[in-house]
Image (cartoon, helix red, strand yellow):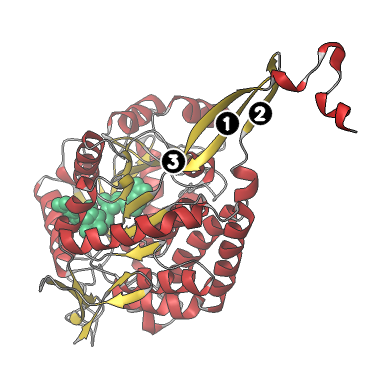
Amino acid sequence: MKELTHYINGAHVKGTSGRFSDVFNPATGEVQAKCPLATAAELAQAVEVAEAAQPAWAAVNPQRRARVMMKFVDLLNRDMDKLAEALSAEHGKTFPDAKGDVQRGLEVVEYCIGAPELLKGEFTDGAGPGIDIYSMKQPLGVTAGITPFNFPAMIPMWMFAPAIVCGNAFILKPSERDPSVPLMLAELMEEAGLPQGILQVVQGDKEAVDAILDHDVIQSVGFVGSTPIAEYIYGRGCSNGKRVQAFGGAKNHMIVMPDADMDQAADALVGAGYGAAGERCMAISVAVPVGDETADRLIEKLVPRIEKLKVGPYTAGDDVDYGPLVTAEARERVLGLVNAGVEAGAELVVDGRDFTLQGYENGFFVGPHLFDKVTPDMEIYKQEIFGPVLSTVRAGSYEEAVQLAMDHEYGNGTAIFTRDGDAARDFTHRINIGMVGVNVPIPVPLAYHTFGGWKKSMFGDLNQHGPDAFKFYTRTKTVTSRWPSGLKEGGEFHFKAMD
Ligand code: NAD
């Protein structure tokens, strides 16, 4: 059995706790590796290394730090297939999806190459007689991030690239379900020229996370994962005086207006609802057609598309639409929610409960499901399912559809499909959700904008990537200086006398 490692001070280090978690091949259900789960002492060792290494890295000028990122981009492109292969093997997502995972991380690394420009401070010349004021953006010191299983390349890069280019050291605690790619990324960063100890990977579970939250030296914690844990991390991290940003779960609604292009809307819903088996925080999990006639037309378009979806292992080729869920527990949880939906009276229009794949009977595959006539009191509406299950909630009017999305506790993403510019404009202005698409089902902002939800999808005030990341990973120091002694009466400089 392959035993995975931590990555501390430039070396792969075996775990000492004696505790491990299983890493599965989700397509076959087999355990393929053991992931060590760190103790507080192992975490403290990484912090000690980071604290010693960080001042020298902060003293490297921003242009040179950016060059490491430039080289890292080259190495990501060189190793794209290798990274995607390792990612698919542990996560289960399709090969093109795995490359997308690396690519969307890489784009944030590219943005970080602009660090010399983005880290420039502010300057006021002559704020008073002989007085100048300037501000600098300085790194925080040792920073840390805790990441989810569903984007094991992208989300770590969203955190560590801005943290490191700003001059911080970064300790990554990746998901214990797919821990290999983060180790590969740490190796590549060092190949790109990053000094040892600036990016370290400490594998683990709650014990390692709590050690991060309680360690005095760690200045900031970034978290992405489910809402209950995000809320916990935010509370404990903040009460320990750390800067924290914690991104949580989602229940993203797509409103389909009667005037929408129904083929386009149906295509969008199939991609956004079932892509990556629904294991995306920006997946659309609720379709909200406005009016019964719209709902009937939409369902009629959706069913044949859903029935055509090809579910399979990533090794079966690029025409596979989505792969297995990440663990057997995830599969059981999703199927349990589907059963709860049926019991609550929702209409299961496409039933994927009996789905099996020949040769992969022990894999964590779940067939696609489509529910109609879901109501807001049902668990399948309230909870984030995180599986290939799309619920349809019929709204009587545009107002009712908007109110539905507004009233949900999550506020990550949403979309409206319409040809009516007025309705789209009204929606984008009024909706209390962080990322909004107009005829775009998964409105993930590009690297130079920021990513973040509202309500229970985000705790903190600065978003991921874009300019917010540079604010999160730096603090401002403002210097007010006065040099009146340089001026003689009459405006001549005293050093003239020395000519
Ligand atoms: P998760 O909350 O189970 O785990 C996330 C991280 O927290 C992991 O590193 C895990 O080891 C750690 N963790 C788990 N339980 C813990 C505990 N009790 N105490 C301390 N740490 C703990 O999430 P997941 O299943 O890995 O990821 C899926 C979730 O992430 C979904 O809810 C999804 O919506 C969300 N997500 C959100 C975003 C976003 O930007 N808002 C992006 C991706 C995923």
Q: CA distance from mark 1 to mark 2?
A: 7 Å
**Residue where numbered disc 3 is placed:** 472
Please report the residue visible at 41 percent of the width from the left and 65 percent of the height from the top. Answer: 153
Please report contact status of discs 1 and 2: CB closer than 8 Å, yes or no.
yes
Is 399 left, or right, of 422 in this rendering? left
Q: Does residue 323 appear in this view?
A: yes
Residue closest to the eye, 7 or 261: 7
The tag earlier along the polypeptide, 1 or 3, is: 1
Tag count in the figure? 3
Q: Quadrant of the N terminus?
A: bottom left
Amino acid type of the residue that numbered disc 3 sits on in the rendered structure: Phe
Q: Residue at x 40, y 79 (%)?
A: 85
Residue at x-position 23% and y-position 58%? 44
Mark 2 vs 3, N-terminal side: 2
Q: Residues within 10 Å of mark 1 (few under 14, many from 20)?
A: some
Image quadrant assignment for residue 489: top right
Q: Earlier in the sequence, mark 1 or mark 2?
A: 2
Ligand 1 neighbours mark 1 (CB distance < 8 Å)? no
The residue under label 1 is 135
* Mark-to-mark CA distance, 2 and 3: 21 Å
